[in-house]
Amino acid sequence: MHDLSNIPWNQFPTDAAPDDLVSKNFLFIELTKSEIATRQGIANGFPSVSELHCAVYLCRNVLQPVREKFGRYTPNSVFRSQDLERALKNMPSSWRSDSQHTMGQACDIEVLSATNMKLALWVRDNLEFDQLILECYSAEEGPNSGWVHVSVRPPGYGDNRKQVLSYVKNPQTRKFEYVQELVETP
Ligand SMILES: [Zn+2]
């Protein structure tokens, strides 16, 4: 294990080892780890240096501050390759995902010490982000339902829009839809 946490994000090496430290509490492997990719034998490495650098920036500016505030947790998902996106969303090989996960700019997180609503509120009020989405959070299903999606663009990768959304079930149609701000389904 090497501590690479002091190397600038835009100089982070492409040949880092899985157990090298990207930030104080996160290993390089945690930026690409996916249970589904492992189980289905899908490659989920960074395709180029820009995805790698974006993920290192995200790790240091989102994952690590959340760890310091809420304690130990494992991110559900950070980088996702096009192949992994197609497998997750059951799409044909001609389809291309435009998710920020494929750019190394997004993570899905949950913490043990707070509800997803509290986590989302804290991110909104304390971190730099591009898009914050409280996903599938429903009072009916309990305080731990859903997860929090956070994306951030490093300097030189576009402006951070500070967009705050929830992806919730419409009580009338029973279908999930995006709505402004952080809300839960009744
Ligand atoms: Zn996500």
Image: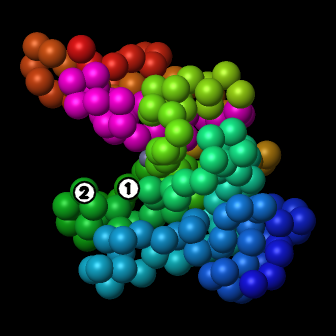
Vertical order, 145 against 22 (above or below): above
Q: Position of residue 5 (x, y in %)?
A: 83, 66
Residue of label 1: 97
Q: Is residue 79 left or right of residue 93?
A: right
Mark 2 residue's CB less than 8 Å from ligand 1: no
Does residue 133 show up magenta in the picture?
Answer: yes
Give me the disc on residue 89: 2
In this view, 147 is above or below 14: above
Q: Secondary structure at mark 2?
A: helix
Q: Quick check: is 47 in the magenta stretch?
A: no
| Three-letter amino acid code of the residue under disc 1 | Ser
Q: Is residue 134 visible?
A: yes
Please determine whether, in this image, residue 130 is positioned above or below residue 19.
Answer: above
Stretch in magenta: 127-150
Task: Assess whether mark 2 and mark 1 are in contact (beta carbons under 8 angstroms).
Answer: yes
Q: Give how far across and how far down residue 96 sits, in percent.
A: 35, 59
Which residue occupies the foreground of this view, 49 or 36? 36
The spot of residue 66 in percent (x, y) is 65, 43
Which quadrant holds the C terminus? top left
The image quarter containing residue 51 is bottom right
Local packing at callout 2 (Cα closer than 10 Å; few below 14, some 14-19, many 20+) is few
Residue 129 image-quadrant placement: top right
